Amino acid sequence: MDPSQKKGMLRLIFSPRMLVAFVMGFSCGMPLLLTITVLQAWMKEEGVDLTVIGLMALVGLPYTVKFLWAPFLDRYTLPFLGRRRGWMLAAQICLALAIAGLGLSDPAAYPWLLALAAFLVTFFSATQDIVVDAYRREDLTDEELGLGSSLYINGYRVGMLLASGGGMIMADFMSFQMVYLIMAACMLPGILTTLLSREPIVTEALPRSIRSAVIDPLLEYFSRKNAVWILAFILFYKIGDTMALAMTTPFYLDIGFTKTEIGTVVKLFGFWATIAGGLVGGVMMFRLGIHRSLWIFGFLQMVSILGFAFLARIGYSVPALCGVIAFENLSGGMGTAAYAAFMASITDKRFTATQYALLSSLMGIPRVLASAPTGFLAKVLGWEGFFYFCTLTAVPGMLLLLKFARRPVKAPAPY
């Protein structure tokens, strides 16, 4: 890359549009673990029954069914800031208030009021996700989607780290109520970014009824060539990686790593490797295009699973663990960036919120269903055999690329 290209790339990375993508990623990632990790710790500290703590997982339901109200956000525009920014601002303000309300709850005395507050947090968080995904698709060109998606994902991870790691550390020095009030204030960067950003210009005719906002996105998508194959690809592209990662913590403990080593190498070192992977993947996608990147990153993602099999064979080794984590998280970050950019690129701008919500909900299915039998498989196959099996399960996702990844992505594309 010559100096002028480097300068142009740096100018793009630090452009206002990319900064918006990063900050919006932070705003979307920060609330996620406030109703999982941090809330579980607070309820445990307050002596809440473990059964109730387990049932609190149900408050995350809005994340998996967000496509149900996405058409409403495509159809209607609030009377301020435009079609996307209006809904973003409304969702962010409601989310900040819900997080503050969750912090003012009493887990021991009123657990069901706590559950209601947590549900409101996930509902407004999922709503923010819908609108931010639509905004990013409409604000960025097809060529910028890869880099924009990688910066969004990196911002998302920074937000998650602040909420989980930062929230747990702060809880040792102050009350959980104060932690949640601080997290509510952390929504301010997203709110300010929404107020200062531009509204995307969409030239296509927008849906004029709820029926057109619900039915037309499905008709438009399934009228494309290879529509079903693309859905299958979304289901299978990261399935091997997902299955392998579902059992890594028991695996590390089983071969002799301490919890401190796991926390230091896997969580902290691995976090920065993932961030680097997302950024490197975004830059490479800008030069290679989304489809070619899906091939390269998918292959690296598949090969990285073999690192766990190698670790299972040699046993305890901190240097080997560092190498395996660096490669897996780097390639995983690259693959996730390409995956998100691809899904955004195939949405029709008339129905961005609805189509992307459907696709991203579909993306979450393997995380639940494919992860369920991993413990049984590891027990039957042994750790080394299990990771070989996970590597093989990544092959169908790569082969599905043959059906449609031979020409540039355009949206809506005539698949």
Image: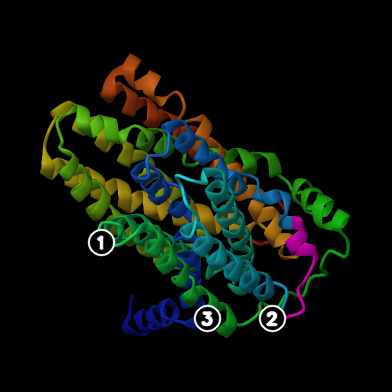
Q: Can you tell which quarter of the image residue 78 is in?
A: bottom right
Place of residue 139 in the rendered image (x, y in percent of width and height, measured from the top left): 61, 74
**Residue wearing tag 3:** 192
What's the residue at 32%, 37% (across, down)? 305
Q: Secondary structure at mark 3?
A: helix
Which secondary structure lies at badge 2? loop
Name the residue: 49% across, 70% down. Answer: 187
Task: Report the quarter where the N terminus lies.
Answer: bottom left
Place of residue 183 in the rendered image (x, y in percent of width and height, measured from the top left): 42, 65
Residue type highlighted by circle 1: Phe
- Closer to the camera, 346 or 195? 195
Label 2 belongs to which residue? 81
Camera-nearest label, 1 or 2: 1
The label on residue 173 is: 1
**Depicted 181 relative to depicted 47: above or below:** below
Q: Is residue 13 left or right of residue 319?
A: right
Q: Identify residue type, mark 3.
A: Leu
* Lower sequence index among marks 1 and 2: 2
Could you say where residue 90 lies in the image, as x and y percent from the top left? Answer: 65, 71
Residue range (magenta): 71-80
Residue at image position (63%, 59%) is 127
Mark 1–mark 2 Cα distance, whole angstroms, equals 40 Å
Q: Residue at x 50, y 64 (%)?
A: 100
Along the polypeptide, which appears first: circle 1 or circle 3? 1
- Give the vertical position of 321 relative to 175 (above or below): above
Judged by depth in the image, the label closer to the viewer, 1 or 3, is: 1
On screen, residue 332 versus residue 404, left or right, reads left
Considering every residue shown, the one lying at the far front of the view is: 109
